[in-house]
Amino acid sequence: MRWVAPIVVGVTAAFAGASAFAGWDYNRFAAKARGRRSTAFDLGGTEPTPIDHRVAELTRESRGRSGLLLLASNLDAFAARALSARSAGRSLDLMYYIWHGDLTGRLLAAEALAAADRGVRVRFLLDDLGVSGDDRVMLALDSHPNIELRLFNPTRARANPVRRAAEMLLRAWSVNRRMHNKAWIVDGRLAIVGGRNVGDEYYDASESSNFRDLDLLCLGPAVTESEKVFDTYWNSGVALPIGKLAKGIVRPRLKRVRAQLQRVAGSREAKPYLDRLKSHMALEGLLDHAAVHWCDKVEIVSDCPEKAAGRDDGNRVMDYLLPVMEAAIERLEITSPYFIPGDRGVESLTELRRRGVQVAVLTNSLAATDVAAVHGGYAPYRKPLLEAGVALFELKPDGRSPSLTLRGSSRASLHTKAFAVDGRHGFIGSLNFDPRSSSLNTEMGILFTSPVLVQRMSELFNEETDPAMSYAVALDEGGKLCWTAEKEGEKSALYESEPDAAVGRRLLATVVGWLPLESQL
């Protein structure tokens, strides 16, 4: 068996060499493939648009403050994007981790294309791994004179799945780092930032399961800061034009793609969803002055794009937000679909409890989560958190608000990434409280001070942690985990193992909990 060690060493060295060469070759290609630099328009030298007029009415007495409108309803969140695109007269800057080619993805793509047909400049910045479908539709959109589409941290191999898999294996260290940001910016006057991507499950249009999520619609200086973040990513060396990547792929005619997208709105598939949207489809009603909260302190916090390239080790968003949470005096409420606090997080929350701060965390149950493997990283931290006095809640898979209806689905999953401190300070964004968001993916969000808005966040938190919607996790007299919740009209039900979770999910979470994978979750 003496020959085993040399072979292992040789194979490892060969793979390391091939990986290093693949990284060098990719960086050389990316440097040549970078697109031309462009930035947000100077608003002082452009003709006023409908959005300009509407925002001017709202900001007339804002005294330089940013306005925030909470989008808790999935239908409102879709309507805000569709209506603002329909009213755009200057620019659409769209930055997303996921853009599905499903019903809502096609409807919003149709709105963006229609805006481009009116002369609006449209810039799509999409994470390469989060885009479903092939490159041909993206190439067709990119062929429009007013549309440019770039992919973040993309693979060079596009058409050949074997070559693409080989590249991802050899560049695993860098491919594993993704752009998780979400921003929808219109005319430099309105921005939507938060947790929602583009896809049916984010807008109550999925027939299997839909997310509970939050966005903030922003007006005023916060929009300018959002544009700066977009421009930084757009002009980085990590974002490459689709046309430079997909050479050799036959582009379908834009006319054909336009016709396909336009047919979606009149299809039988879309009718039930669009019928439900009718009451939401008025820009004036959406941008109601009474619903906008004007805040003296609003900050757009963002990682830099170099984090995804591995050239910046700073976890800027997490490092900025942790002191805000650790400064809590009375109460801290955390909502995160994927919650892996790590030793540092447990220590911080334990210290808050020692100081008498009430700490509550809402995350997904194993039955509700869309990524069962992450639950394996979260599970070991439940007991130390409960022993410290942290209140833990896990959303039930059927944890629905009775006021919400779905397109054929009664299942729910948590996707909100937010926290509230002392009834005054809040954060909503793309950041999960897990190692992947902290160290691997780029993130962004909005940190703000607004007692009224934070009160609304707390009301939603209380609704979602109610026994009708979530399991309360506790330790029994013997120190074992148990779950309580309302069930089928009963006052409460007690579970001694992961409630309502299938055997396969339990097995996967258990195995992941045994493996040294936490840094990748």
Image: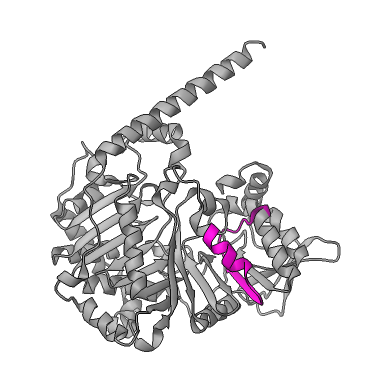
Q: Residue at x 45, y 33 (%)?
A: 169
Return the residue found at the far top: 2
Colouring method of the image: one colour
Residue 129 falls left or right of residue 119: right
Residue 438, percent from left and from top: 53, 53
Residue 219, percent from left and from top: 34, 76
**Would you place residue 375 above or below residue 294 in this image?**
above
Residue 73, percent from left and from top: 43, 76
Return the residue found at the far right: 478
The span shown in magenta is: 319-343
**Would you place residue 37 above or below residue 207 in this image?**
above
Q: How many marks?
A: 0
Residue 74, percent from left and from top: 42, 72
Q: Is residue 397 visible?
A: no
Return the residue found at the far front: 63
Depth check, front residue: 290 or 469: 290
Image quadrant occupied by the N terminus: top right
Q: Is residue 280 visible?
A: yes
Residue 8 falls left or right of residue 108: right
Residue 511 falls left or right of residue 89: right
Q: Is residue 331 magenta?
A: yes
Depth check, front residue: 357 or 401: 357
**Quarter of the view holding residue 56:** bottom left
Depth check, front residue: 466 or 499: 466
Q: Residue at x 57, y 51 (%)?
A: 435
**Would you place residue 196 above or below residue 137 in this image?**
below
Q: Residue at x 66, y 80 (%)?
A: 489
